[in-house]
Amino acid sequence: MSIEATLDELAAEFELLGDWEERYRYVIELGRGLDPLAPAERSDANKVRGCASQVWLVTEPQADGVLRFRGDSDAHIVRGLIAILLRLYSGRPPAEILAFDAKAAFQRLGLTGALSAQRSNGLFSMTERIRRDAAAPTAAA
């Protein structure tokens, strides 16, 4: 499934939910499904700068050229935002990651207007980290 099809699927799920209180609960529920990171993966190298909460993202280039991402946070809502990002980006080739308009996607999902400025900045920082890792020479190797 393409990244756009995944976004369509997420948008449809969000539309089924009424108000933002229900959507917040759904985002938190998505975060509960994340696999935990090993203690060693909660390292400074994996920490995402620019987030108010503690956030770690692990990037794993795969043999077939796609990037797999895993992540975790100490905040429930942020774990949910990570789950959304992983659903969109994990398992994709670097070119697809870099071509995707994350800002438009977050607007379509309604995240841009529903999140506090601090959470929006954190979401932007996580997205930029994913894009930076996708642009790294080792990602294309």
Image (cartoon, helix red, strand yellow):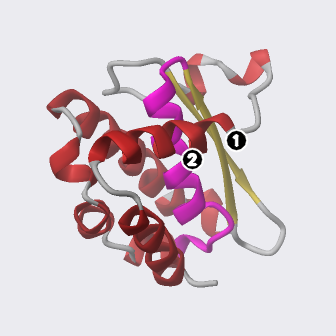
Q: Amino acid at mark 2?
A: Ala
Q: Residue 51: where, in percent of width, then height?
A: 34, 26
Q: Residue 35: where, in percent of width, then height?
A: 76, 37
Q: Are marks 1 and 2 in contact (CB under 8 Å)?
A: yes
Q: Say above or below: 77 vs 68.
A: above
First of labels 1, 2 by sequence position:
1
Residue beneath the point at 32% across and 67% down? 105
Q: In what quadrant of the picture does the N terminus appear?
A: bottom right
Residue beneath the point at 55% across and 63% down? 89
Q: Residue 11: where, in percent of width, then height?
A: 40, 70
Whether residue 90 sits left or right of residue 55 in the image: it is: right
Magenta stretch, residue numbers: 74-95
Q: Residue furthest right?
A: 63
Determine which of the numbered discs, if any, sits on residue 83 in the image. Answer: 2
Bin the neighbour count of mark 2 within 10 Å (Cα to Cα): few under 14, some 14-19, many 20 and up: many
Q: Amino acid at mark 1?
A: Gly
Q: Say above or below: 36 vs 91.
A: above
Q: Say above or below: 90 vs 122.
A: below
Q: Residue 116: where, in percent of width, then height?
A: 19, 32
The residue tagged 1 is 33
Whether residue 30 sits left or right of residue 132 in the image: it is: right
Magenta highlight on residue 53? no
Q: Say above or below: 20 vs 103.
A: above
Q: Quadrant of residue 125?
A: top left
Q: Secondary structure at mark 2?
A: helix
Q: Out of 31 and 99, give the one closest to the viewer.
A: 31
